[in-house]
Amino acid sequence: MAGCLRRPGQANPPSAEADDGVGPPPPLADWSRLVPSDLERYGDRSLSGGVSQDGIPSIDEPTFWSLAEVNYEDADPVFGLLRNGVAKAYPQRVLVHHEIVNDEIGGEPVSVTYCPLTGTAQGFRRGETEFGVTGSLVNSNLIMYDRETESWWPQMLATAVGGPHTGNVLQEFEVTWTTFGRWAEAHPDSTVLSIDTGYLRDYDDDPYGSYNPLREYYRNDRIVFEVFNEDDRLHPKAVVIGARTADAAVAVEKDRLREAGLLTTSSGGTTFAVVHEPTLDTAIVYRDPGDHALGHDGDRPTVDGESRDPGDLPGERVVSFDAMWFAWAAYYPDTALERA
Amino acid sequence: MSAPTPPRPVARVAAGLAHRFRVLSLVVRRRRPIGVLLIGTVGYLLAFLYALGDLSIEDTGRDVVTVADPWSRMFEPGSGPYTHEPIALVELEVAELLFSPLNVLLGLGLAILVGANLALTVLAITQPRSCGIGASTGLLAAVPALLGGTACCAPVLLLVLGIQAGSLTLGLVGWLLPIGAALLVATLAYLAGKIDPRVLARADEAG
């Protein structure tokens, strides 16, 4: 249906036809990631969020402060990135106004992205290009575009749904949703994204509500934009840890994981082990942990009765991220779910 | 004897416009309506900027910070339909203004229309013999524009209204502001057309 008459409010994704005039794409993954619907459907069902392309401006020349230069509260949410031996924190209060930071970490060009409406923070390698905000949404989720090929990349899907790279997959890495106090204690040498973004915004004000304390959009049960699928097994804004592979998606309610310490679940014939990492109050997801007896002694995970560090479990680590339940269920209706 | 020739359409439109400009010029010379016009204009402009998120009430110092390249930045699109980027942060001790010249211009245009509608409404209340119109007409006319003023950012408006949006709802949100502006112009023209400037002028001479 792309290219046919569009209704008012419906977004207008680029066509999938190749354009020889475009520059290099962002680095692409050589593996696939679960895409439960036809790619065309994501473009057809995308909505204009009332914002023009780049109307929410990405931060393209970020500057950073030392931890000592900021006076954030310990409970303020930040997105932590530890990569190439460098630690950086990206405050939610800054990213809520920009959604994308085109940065370099240890010499590697990366984009740290955040969608306030789905509560998702994800990192992508960007190569020579930059990502920007299209102003359109699918399943209430940010649709990014790369500035060289103008392909459309829904953040959570991390797969292009419009433009010359339709069907290609981005190289993704983990960004940790934690708090300023936890991150500063774990990484005292970290720097923090400053508010010298090149744009003027009221960075003390979050137009959607607040995480500290939790209120308004981040707490109520409203889903602002139409989604593919609604699932009432959890409160729409309950936080889940989500992970997906080429053919399976799993979600674990974060409150349940805090209680249990470690959970195993299966989806699409694959077994996943999800372990709580208490220092940053985050999770690490492993696939195919083998025939080991996995457990938790109340303090640390155990493998065959032996205490282990959460980062040292058997199996292959899978990228995971925090998400609001409604958004995860909208993208992945057949997801496995572990809940209280 | 032949019947008088009816005026041509262009002449009728010109006469209608001249009539309305005469009414508005008489209105701005009268103390009470001009007071209402000014208060309505300033009040709506402040409400519009607050709804956009450009104006906030908070304890601040007294300072002005500008962006590096204000002349190009002021034309960049903002985070809502019809809005543009701010170029200065103005701290006024009790309030903070993210100053975007084009947002202020847009708000001022709508605000003058709202103020003028309110001024004519006051005239309708105080000079009923000249009007023959309901006092509520001008007030009703201000409603769509007030809604339009909150159409700065579709997600925020939808959060306030508590509705889930599909493409049609979003399409409507995008049209609120121009619809509101068009309705304000239409009601202003209607109200001014109902007022007889000769009655107002005679009242001025008598008073």
Image (cartoon, rainbow, N blue to C red):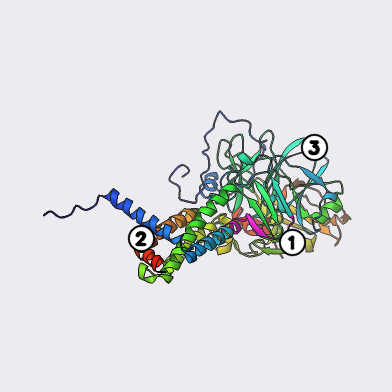
Q: Nearer the viewer, mark 2 or mark 3?
A: 2
Q: Nearer the viewer, mark 2 or mark 1?
A: 2
* Label 2 – label 1 distance at C-alpha: 55 Å
Left-right relation of B48 to A1: right
Q: Are marks 2 and 1 in contact (CB under 8 Å)?
A: no
Q: Chain of mark 3?
A: A
* Label 2 – label 3 distance at C-alpha: 70 Å
Q: Secondary structure at mark 2?
A: helix
Residue A95: mark in rendering: none
* Label 3 – label 1 distance at C-alpha: 31 Å
Q: Is residue A316 magenta?
A: no
> Could you tell me the amino acid type at mark 3?
Gly
What residue is shown with label 1? A212
Q: Chain of mark 1?
A: A
Task: State the residue in front, A110 or B185.
Answer: B185
Magenta stretch bounds: B48-61
Task: State the residue in front, A142 or A65.
Answer: A65
Q: Is residue B60 magenta?
A: yes
Q: Secondary structure at mark 3?
A: loop
Q: Chain of mark 2?
A: B
Task: State the residue in front, A197 or A293.
Answer: A197
Residue A106: mark in rendering: 3
Left-right relation of B184 to B65: left
Using the image, determine if residue A29 lies above or below residue A174: above
Using the rendered view, name the quadrant where residue B54 is placed.
Answer: bottom right
